[in-house]
């Protein structure tokens, strides 16, 4: 069994058993106020394994299924094992929520759930490795790098605007993590990325 599939199964089990159970979601969600007041740092991790509804879960896990397997295999070749894939996913759960923590640590009513930060990290590592691969966005084929730019711009804009109940900060910083993480350990991937971008000219 791949690590990607194991993560999907675990996430689905925890999410399914949390649907229509607000008290369970409260225990697992990322709740900055409780992280600060009660030192419940485990929420950085557990919030990524629970989702608001079937649609939220479906889109996150579908994206992880398509790109997680690719990155898991690629990281075996690049790094010689699967440890970096696990680290990237876990960091994708934790690091993108740090800015959210500082923004909402004094706001009792704010909570967020979902694996979007980690999934964004996986997706953007895939974009780094294959920028001109095609992604289907609302059934429209779009080069991955173009989608990436639009995604980052949209997430940054919506983060400033707010009001839609979605943690766009996690999307944005998860995406940045996915681009930066492989480059920290293999800087030469940056040169390969640029070469691929210029290959169409």
Image: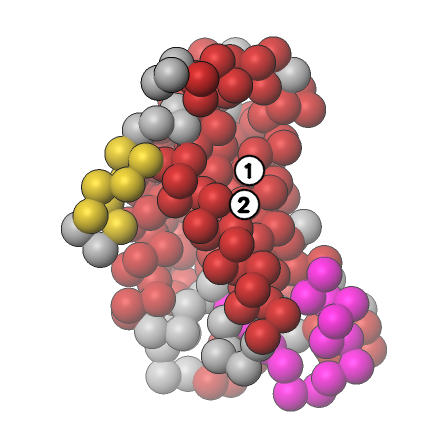
Reading the image, the residue beneath label 2 is: 175
Camera-nearest residue between 95 and 45? 95
Find numbered disc 1 in the image and state the secondary structure of the residue it sits on: helix
Where is residue 65 shown, x and y percent of the image?
A: 31, 42
**Quick one: which residue is furthest to the front in this view?**
201
Whether tag 1 and tag 2 are in contact, CB under 8 A, the answer is: yes
Image quadrant occupied by the C terminus:
top left
Reading the image, the residue beneath label 1 is: 178
Give above or below for 95 relative to 76.
below
Whether residue 96 is visible here, answered yes or no, is yes
Whether residue 118 is visible here, answered yes or no, is no
Please report the residue visible at 32 percent of the width from the left and 35 percent of the height from the top.
143
Q: How many marks?
A: 2
Camera-nearest residue between 123 and 92? 123
How has the structure been colored for display?
secondary structure
Where is residue 90 shown, x and y percent of the image?
A: 58, 44
Q: Left or right: 71 with respect to 100?
A: left
Q: Left or right: 66 with respect to 114?
A: left
Find numbered disc 2 in the image and state the secondary structure of the residue it sits on: helix
Where is residue 79 shown, x and y percent of the image?
A: 55, 15
Please report the residue visible at 28 percent of the width from the left and 68 percent of the height from the top.
55
Q: Where are the magenta residues, as a range?
A: 99-113
Decide whether residue 48 is among the magenta residues.
no
Residue 44: image quadrant is bottom right
Please report the residue visible at 61 percent of the width from the left and 40 percent of the height from the top.
177
Image quadrant occupied by the N terminus:
top left
Category of crowding for the residue at label 2, using alpha-carbon neighbours closer than 10 angstroms: few (below 14), some (14–19), many (at least 20): many
Camera-nearest residue between 188 and 3? 188
Q: Left or right: 3 with respect to 154?
A: left
Decide whether residue 104 is among the magenta residues.
yes
Give above or below for 100 relative to 70.
below
């Amino acid at each position: 069994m791949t690590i990607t599939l194991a993560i999907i199964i675990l996430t689905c089990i925890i999410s399914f058993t949390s649907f229509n159970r607000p008290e369970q979601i409260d225990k697992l969600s990322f709740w900055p106020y409780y992280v600060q007041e009660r030192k419940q740092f485990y929420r950085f991790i557990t919030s990524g394994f629970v989702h608001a509804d079937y649609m939220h879960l479906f889109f996150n896990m579908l994206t992880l299924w398509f790109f997680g397997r690719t990155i898991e295999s690629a990281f075996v070749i690049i790094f010689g094992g699967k440890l970096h894939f696990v680290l990237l996913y876990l960091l994708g759960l934790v690091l993108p929520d740090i800015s959210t923590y500082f923004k909402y640590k004094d706001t009792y009513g704010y909570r967020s759930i979902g694996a979007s930060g980690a999934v964004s990290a996986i997706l953007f590592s895939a974009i780094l490795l294959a920028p001109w691969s095609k992604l289907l966005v609302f059934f429209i084929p779009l080069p991955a790098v173009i989608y990436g730019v639009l995604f980052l711009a949209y997430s940054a804009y919506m983060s400033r605007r707010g009001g839609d109940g979605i943690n766009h900060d996690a999307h944005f910083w998860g995406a940045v993590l996915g681009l930066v993480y492989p480059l920290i350990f293999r800087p030469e991937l940056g040169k390969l990325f640029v070469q691929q971008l210029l290959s169409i000219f």
